[in-house]
Image (cartoon, grey):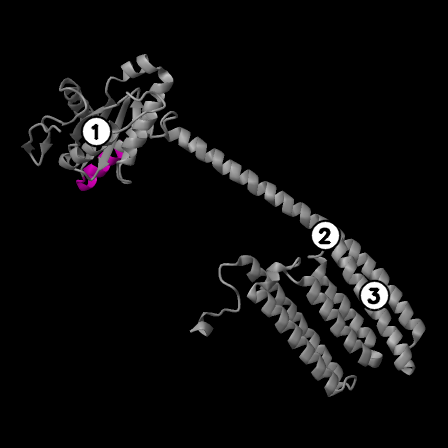
Amino acid sequence: MAANCFGIFPRNDPEQELRLKRFFLGIAAYFMNSAFVLVCWRMGYFSSTIVTRYAVLTITFNLMFYCLIRSGLNKRLADPSLTFSQMAVATLVVFNLMYFSGDARNTYLVLLLSMLLFGLFRFKTRDFAGLAVLILCGYALLIALLVRQRPDGIVLKVEILQWMALLATLAQFTFLAGYIGRLRHKVRVNNQELAKRNTELEAALQRISDMAIRDELTGVYNRRYLMERVAEEAQRCLRNGSVFCICMVDIDLFKQINDTYGHPAGDEVLRSVAATVAGSMRQTDFFGRIGGEEFVMVLTDTLSEGALISAERARKKVEQLTFPDISADLRVTISIGIAEHVRRSEPAATFKRADEALYRAKEGGRNRCVVDAVFHLHGASVPELRA
């Protein structure tokens, strides 16, 4: 079962997946180089032992690098991509082939330079310079070994000239790698700045959108947006016969709160009441402030009986609010007038009936919910309901 869960690429780790994709790109280069090694073997430049050793070294080192990345151990290293290590190992493998390749030795310098392209777009100047020093020292050591052990198979002046050409080429590569690295850093910084600005722009657009539909003080929907939603709900009611209720909510004796504790305290009361009522409603309902201390609850797919239950729940929660930062004695209550929308009637008529029910709640002693005295439901008259 564990084997079935194993994947070539790690799950939910994009960085490691990208590193492994680069690793397999290097494997593809190894395959192409291996094809060239086989050609040299067929032409008699290598013995079967040399080719076998090359295959063993290549497979062993690449398996080791794959296991390091796939296991996540590479994350503990300074270079988690292992690019420098992989190129250093590949360089040593190429030098091993060059030692035994005889007259074909110079052709492997071309393969060596093509391999450097993998680091050209990844390394900083310092990294590429370190790799260049490794290659130059390795090639110098190779020349010294050939002069000592196989003097008949080497022309020293030519090898020195090639070493100097390699030095000039690597110096240019190092300069180019530094230039590309600076460009890459600049692009990365610009992308980060662009991402930051995009985030700020999205936040600004969200604030503008909220300002267009939200009441600045309480954060609930404003009057304009609320009326748009009610109009949409009335159209839905007309199309498919759905029902909804409008509940007019008014904070009792709010003027006395302002006069006694000041307008900042009144603003705090408005925010607390708005948050409490909104928190008592379903996500399908919507709630907004239409002015002063007056709010509106719009309860979708709800008959007046259900609306009364919802309104009572909100009223009781507001009644339990305390305001220790204003006064331990301050208690706030709300009155609510409820009207069920009648199909084919105008939303303004439903608002008027809810407002009349609210007036009766105030006249009846406040801190109560009153359903519209008479409304038409399936052609029947229903008496007024009170909490």
Q: Which mark's residue is nearer the viewer, 2 or 1?
A: 1
The answer to whether residue 214 shows anywhere in this view is: yes
Kind of residue at disc 3: Leu
| Residue hosting label 2 | 180
Residue 104 is labelled as: none
Locate the C terminus and report the quarter of the image it occupies.
top left
Q: Is residue 151 above or below residue 198?
A: below
Relative placement, left or right, of 21 versus 362 is right
Instruction: State the residue position of label 1.
Output: 247
Distance from disc 3 to disc 2, alpha carbons, whole Å, reads: 22 Å
Q: Is residue 11 above or below residue 371?
A: below
Mark sitting earlier along the chain (2/1): 2
Q: Which residues are magenta?
A: 231-242
Q: Nearer the viewer, mark 3 or mark 2?
A: 3
Q: Position of residue 150 (x, y in %)?
A: 89, 82
Going by the picture, which residue comes out furthest to the right?
Answer: 157
Q: Position of residue 58 (x, y in %)?
A: 68, 76
Q: Which residue has dot 3 on it?
A: 136
**Residue 301 position within the rendered picture, expressed as x and y whole percent measured from the top left:** 20, 40
User: At 80% across and 81% down in the image, what residue appears?
Assistant: 100
What is the three-letter code of the residue carrying label 2?
Answer: Ile
How crowded pointer 3 is (Cα within 10 Å; few <14, some 14-19, many 20+) is rated as: some
Residue 372 location, quadrant: top left
Residue at the spot 83% in from the left edge and 61% down from the top edge: 169
Helix, strand or loop for disc 1:
strand
Front residue of 304 and 41: 304
The verdict on residue 162 being magenta is: no
What's under tag 1, amino acid-wise? Answer: Cys
Task: Name the one closer to the observer, 368 or 380.
Answer: 368
Number of numbered discs on residues? 3
